[in-house]
Amino acid sequence: MKRISLGILFSAAVIFSSCRNESETAGERVDEHTNQTQIDSLAQEEQRQPQEIRVEIESKSDSDISGTAVFTEENGEVTMRAELSGLTEGTHAIHLHESADCSAEDGTSAGGHWNPTFEDHGEWGDEDGYHKGDIGNFDADAEGNATVTFSTDEWCIGCEDDTKNIIGTAVVVHDGVDDYTSQPSGDAGTRIGCGEVTE
């Protein structure tokens, strides 16, 4: 009788230990899955978070221009909204230039148009090519004020794609009009405003 009782107790202990190990292993699997799910969820949430950069436009070449350009990225698209004052009435050009350096009095330190894909200059969307910085022309009113809004999925803020990442460029406002033809800059004239796009 004692042998049978001991055998039953031993079997019960083995079964209990086995169940506990399986339960712990299952628990570990659940924890691992839960942690991965949380990581994936956080990554998706970060991707959904809109990003924003505010750029101050400095006057250049003895102009009276001032203003801001705000870049917002949401759902894979970047929108630039520039609010400018101190302009002469009429049409002016605005571009992204290749270097976030507005130190020169005439804005030349910002370099040429931002053109990471090495295209010819042209109007945005031109099948013959255009620079990623070729935003275009806008009109200032009689008081010298203007608002420029531009959206594209060909830009990003701080992503790893150097052909899309606008960090490190500069917003440059020109006194003249971009003719969309002259190479490499559209013959837009004097640089009268400059703002560095930095994080």
Image (cartoon, rainbow, N blue to C red):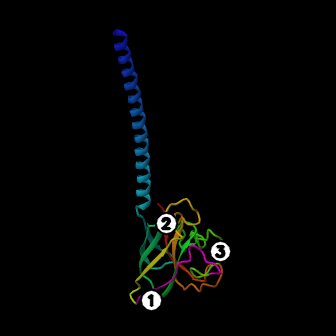
Where does the image place residue 184, in percent across and percent down from the top left? 65, 78
Q: Say left or right for 21 vs 166.
A: left
Instruction: Identify whether 34 is placed above or below 56.
Output: above
Tag 2, which secondary structure? loop
Q: Quadrant of residue 67?
A: bottom left
Magenta: main secondary structure equals loop
Residue labelled with disc 2: 197
Q: Are marks 2 and 3 in contact (CB under 8 Å)?
A: no
**Viewer-closest of 44 and 143:** 44
Label 2 amino acid? Val
Name the residue type under label 1.
Glu
Q: CA distance from mark 1 to mark 3?
A: 31 Å
* Separation of marks 1 and 2 at Cα, in angstroms: 26 Å
Q: Which mark is residue 119?
A: 3
Circle 1 Cα neighbour tier, 10 Å, few/some/many (<14 / 14–19 / ≥20): some
What residue sits right under mark 1 in the picture? 89
